[in-house]
Amino acid sequence: MTMKRPTTIGLALLPLLAISAAHADMMANIKSSGELKCAVYSDVPPFSSPDPKTRQLAGMDIDLCNALAKQMNVKLTLVPTSVEARIAVIATGRADVLIANLAYTKTRGNQIQFSDPYYVAREMLLVKAPLADKPLSYFKGKRISATKGTTSEQSIHIKGGKAVTFQDSASAFLALEQNKSVGFVTNTMTGIKTISQAKKDGINLAMIKEPMALEPIGVGMKRDEPALLASVNSSLKAMDDDGTIDKIWDTWIGPNTEYKMVREERVQPLSSLKFEPLE
């Protein structure tokens, strides 16, 4: 028996079929499998870290993953990842979404797509108390410390300061304590905690009111997946409207926690925010 050779049309369709398979609709796959694979930190409290009692991952991002899966009416599978690998886990398709306190930057925006932000983080300048009422313009050209390679460092350059960088935030803070810098830049959460801890050690710090930079925090997804993006955005809006995000926020980083964070912005399109994106 002789085998039929593929027709010219059949051969022409093969590459198209391959492309189609490679670019399958992730939202359709999520619906058909009934499963949402959500990438989270493996150990970054209070966002996602092992609970000492249960050894299961717990935190703000875990609760957000659960709420998102519930809103999309699918079961949740967590995909633990590191800070370094969190973009790759989405770009390679190992997870459907990434909820890992992910701030929008120009570089990340070219690698993956972002949902509407569910809150806006801020890079803030910590100084010793006597400088508390100074405007940001006062610090132009002055030595300001930050962790090397972070958005905190970027914000110093944007605001015209002279960045003095260190491998970790503890060393960057020590520079301020020892007057090797006039300020230390970090996110609001870390800043509030640092001020509280420093006070116990007899060091009075303050946070300059004007932020160094704004960082919209959203859900990360693979690029060119419009159906998934639309579903995540509509789910976040519903979670915002019914108070789910507020409840999760208050549990983990709200006013009655050590972080004392107040949620100011609601879920809104990235384009509606007035900010200068970091690199």
Image (cartoon, helix red, strand yellow):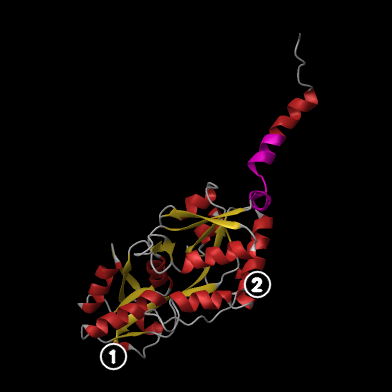
Residue 269 can be seen, yes or no: no
* Between 120 and 163, the one nearer to me in the picture: 120
Residue 38 can be seen, yes or no: yes
Quadrant of residue 59 within the rendered picture: bottom left
Image coordinates of residue 244 in percent, x first then y, are: 57, 75
* Between 268 and 76, the one nearer to me in the picture: 76
Look at 63% across and 53% down and name the residue there.
34
Image coordinates of residue 203 in percent, x first then y, are: 23, 85
Q: Which mark is residue 130?
A: 1
Is 3 magenta? The answer is no
Which residue is outermost to the top? 1
Q: Distance between the residues labelled 2 and 1?
A: 44 Å
Instruction: Name the residue type under label 2.
Output: Ala
- Relative horizontal placement of residue 12, taking residue 168 as reference (left or right): right
Image coordinates of residue 89 in percent, x first then y, are: 49, 50
- Please give the residue where the numbered disc 2 appears in the rendered image: 238
What SS does tag 2 mark? helix
> Which segment is the magenta one?
17-33
- Relative horizontal placement of residue 80, taking residue 92 as reference (left or right): left
Give the overall secondary structure of the magenta segment.
helix
Which mark is in front, 2 or 1? 2
